[in-house]
Image (cartoon, rainbow, N blue to C red):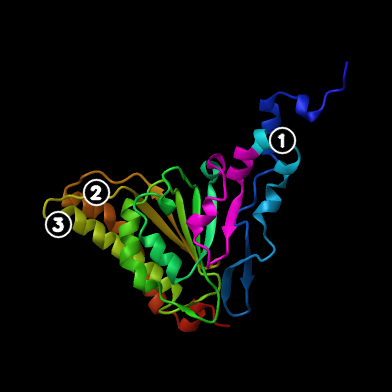
Amino acid sequence: MSKPTFLTLPAELRLQIISYLLPQPPESGFLQLNSPNAALGLILDAAYSSSQHISLLLTCRQFYADFTPLAFSSTTFLIIDTFTPILQRFFTLQAHQRQALRKLAFVAGARQFREMCQWEKWPFDMASLALDELTIVLHRSAHWHYPSDFTSDIVSLLRRLRQVRKLKFVRNGANVKGFFKTWYNRLVGLMLKEDHRQRYDVPGGPYLEDTWWEWGYDENEQSFELRAVERKPVLEEGEYMEWVKPRVQRLVRDMEDEEEDPDPRARNGWP
C-alpha cells in the first residue's frame, strides 16, 4: 500500500488545511508610520507583493485547480501603477480569477478619481466583481490632491454602487488641499444632505439609494471607511429625522473637533 500524501487527501480536507495558511493580517500592503508630533498613518508597503502570497498555486496543476478561488479571495491585490488603466489589468486575469477577487486596493490620482465617479453600478463597471474590500490609496508625491473636486460625484456614486461591502480611503501621506479629514466630514455631510433631498424634496420622489453606508474615521491610520448596509425603507419625514439625528450630531462633533484643532497642520501630516 502506497504511503498517503497531501494530494491523496480528500479535496475538502486539503482546502481546510490550506485555508489556515492563506489569510492575511489586517491592512496587508500597508505600514503604520508615526512621527513624534503627528500620526502619518498608513503608508504603502513597498515590499508587499500579492504574487508572493499566491505563489503556492505554482506548485503543481492540482494546487492551481484546487486552491485558486481560495488563494485569490484571501489575498489583497494592490495596484500601484497609475498609468495603465485598471480595467486593462483585469483582463490579464482569467474570468474565474476575477470572480474570486475579494480585496483590492489601488493608488489613485485625479484620473483614477474621475474614472471611479463614472462607474454605473458595479466596481470598475464589472458586474462579475463582488468585493469585500475596495481601498482607494491617494498617490503620494510632491503634487497636491483636490478631493473636494469629486465630492458631489462620489456621493452620487455611493448611492448607486453595489457589490462592495467596504470602501476605504487612505491618505498614504499624500498632500491634500483642505485637509483629508475636512474632506471626509464634507463628504459625509453631503451624503446626508443628498439623501434627504432625494427622499423629500425632489419632485416625483422618494428616490431611494441602492446602498446606504455607515462611516468612520481613523485618526491613527489617517483613513476612513464606508461600510455598506441595507438601504433604508420609505419613512415619514419626521421618523427619518429621528433616525438621522444621532448621525448628524456625530458629524457636528467631528467638525467641531476639527475646527478646534490648535495646530491644523497636524491634520495633514506635518511634523
32 relative position to 129: left or right: right
Please tell me in which quadrant of the rendered image residue 96 appears.
top right
Residue wearing tag 2: 208
Q: Which residue is mark 1?
A: 61
Residue 248 visible in the shown view: no
Residue 125 in percent (x, y) is at 40, 51
Who's the residue at 37% across and 68% down the image? Answer: 185
Range of residues picked out in magenta: 68-97
Tell me whether the residue at label 1 lies in contact with that at label 2, contact meaning CB atoms closer than 8 angstroms: no
Which tag, 3 or 1, sits closer to the chain's start? 1
The reply to whether callout 3 and callout 2 are in contact (CB within 8 Å) is no
Q: Is residue 161 visible?
A: yes
For numbered disc 1, what is the local secondary structure?
helix
Relative placement, left or right, of 128 versus 37 is: left
> Residue 88, how many percent across, how many down?
51, 56
| Magenta-drawn stretch contains 1 | no
In depth, the one of 111 and 245 nearer the eye is: 111
Q: Amino acid at mark 3?
A: Val
- In the rendered view, does 112 fall on the left or right side of 101? left
Q: Quadrant of the C terminus?
A: bottom right
Residue ID for mark 3: 202
